[in-house]
Image (cartoon, rainbow, N blue to C red):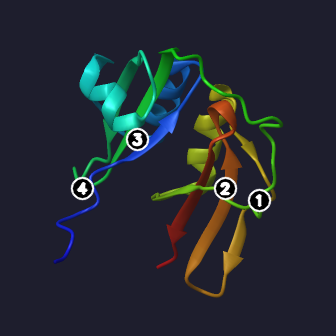
């Protein structure tokens, strides 16, 4: 039996509005918002008394989604420090293909984006960078060179 597709990647955030603004500025589209609670949420997550607000954002091609979740109950568990290096076990990152990496980084800076290193060239194929967004989320950007 095979999977059908990857539906979304879920990320827990502290400031849902800031996270939505960051990913919309990146070029994703807000698909919708919802409040999640009830027995199904408790059973699915293994948590008791789940109450959270979610926002679903999708890539312009409609194939990829991020589910951003702000937990009201139970309170989110912090993983300090938020600036852990990318080689931390269990660390994740989300990568996006972009048309203009320098412009994208410049547009995201007012939303708190900080480069982890610098924009680097991979052979004659790509410009790549990792940056840290809201709540410590690591976002990678790739611009294909023509």
- How much space separates mark 1 and mark 4, taking CA atoms? 28 Å
- How much space separates mark 1 and mark 3, taking CA atoms? 28 Å
Task: Bin the neighbour count of mark 1 within 10 Å (Cα to Cα): few under 14, some 14-19, many 20 and up.
Answer: few
Disc on the earlier residue, 1 or 4: 4
Which of the two discs, 4 and 3, sits closer to the camera? 4
Q: Which residue is mark 4?
A: 63
- How much space separates mark 4 and mark 3, taking CA atoms? 14 Å
- Residue pictured at 56% horizontal, 58% vertical: 141
Q: Is residue 17 left or right of residue 115?
A: left
Task: Bin the neighbour count of mark 4 within 10 Å (Cα to Cα): few under 14, some 14-19, many 20 and up.
Answer: few
- Residue pictured at 27% horizontal, 52% vertical: 7
Q: Which residue is mark 1?
A: 88
Q: Which residue is mark 2?
A: 91
Instruction: Examine the rendering and report whether any part of residue 29 can be seen.
Output: no
Q: Which residue is mark 3?
A: 27
The one of 17 and 143 positioned closer to us in this rendering: 17
- How much space separates mark 3 and mark 2, taking CA atoms? 24 Å
- How much space separates mark 4 and mark 2, taking CA atoms? 23 Å
């Amino acid at each position: 039996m095979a999977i059908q597709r990857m539906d979304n990647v879920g990320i827990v955030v502290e400031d849902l509005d800031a996270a939505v603004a960051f990913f919309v500025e990146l070029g994703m589209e807000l698909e919708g918002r919802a409040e999640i609670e009830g027995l199904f949420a408790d059973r699915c997550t293994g948590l008791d008394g789940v109450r959270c607000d979610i926002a679903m954002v999708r890539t312009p091609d409609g194939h990829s989604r991020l589910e951003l979740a702000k937990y009201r109950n139970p309170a989110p568990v912090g993983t300090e420090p938020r600036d852990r290096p990318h080689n931390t076990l269990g660390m994740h990152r989300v990568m996006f293909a972009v048309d203009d990496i320098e412009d994208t980084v410049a547009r995201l800076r007012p939303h708190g984006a900080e480069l982890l290193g610098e924009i680097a060239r991979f052979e004659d194929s790509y410009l790549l960078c990792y940056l840290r967004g809201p709540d410590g989320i690591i976002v990678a950007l790739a611009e294909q060179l023509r």
